[in-house]
Image (tube, rainbow, N blue to C red):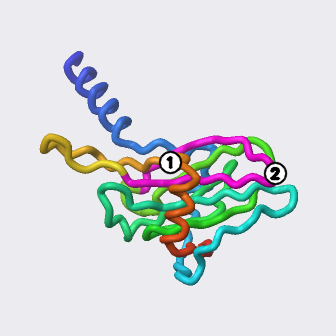
Amino acid sequence: MKIVLVALLFATSAFAQSQYAPLPIACGPDKAHFEVTLDKSQHTLAQPEAGKALVYFIQDDGLYGNHQHFTVRIGSDGEWVGAYKNNSYLALSMSPGEHHLCANVQSQFSVGSLVALAHFTAEAGKVYYFRTQFLGGMTSNEPIPPYLGLDQPDSDQAKYLIDSYPLSVSKRKK
């Protein structure tokens, strides 16, 4: 009987570890999805609206490239605010104050569990840049699981990427 209980305990533990955690509070609802189109004519930097901060999000395929089939959703303070794909960017106007950001791969497959988080305090009239990159690949012939990174690149690098990439226009699917 003890062997059965121990086996059941290990099986339950293994099952629990294979389940994906719910999305953090900074994200939006898991069932929300976006359609994304790219506007290749847009490459100019905007100015913040009066009393607001302007936040650019840049999707950069990163070192291991070719993740064009993934759409990345961007959340702020518990709501999805946009999405992008294929080395592109989006710009959002945000109120001053502390914001909690979430980047999540939109997918019905297990890759949808990839989440990256950050927070920052926005000031009116300022411009901020965040970049998502897919990390992972091979090291010493060993695969590294996929990982979604969210960082704040140098403003010169961010401006260069925005100048090089198209604008993402996202529309929430109903």
- Check disc 1 and report the residue beneath it: 150
- Check disc 2 and report the residue beneath it: 124
Q: Do the residues labelled 1 and 2 touch (CB within 8 Å)?
A: no
Crowdedness near tag 2: few (<14), some (14–19) or many (≥20) residues, C-alpha within 10 Å:
some
Magenta highlight on residue 174: no
Give me the residue at 51% from left, 56% from top. 157
Tell me: 24 left or right of 126.
Answer: left
Indicate which disc, 1 or 2, sits on the residue closer to the N terminus. Answer: 2
Quarter of the image that includes the N terminus: top left
Looking at the picture, which amino acid does disc 2 mark?
Answer: Ala
Say which of marks 1 and 2 sits in front. Answer: 2
Is residue 148 among the parts visible in the rendering?
A: yes
Is residue 73 among the parts visible in the rendering?
A: no
Residue, far bottom:
41
Tell me the quarter of the picture where residue 91 sits: bottom right
Which element carries disc 2, helix, strand or loop? loop
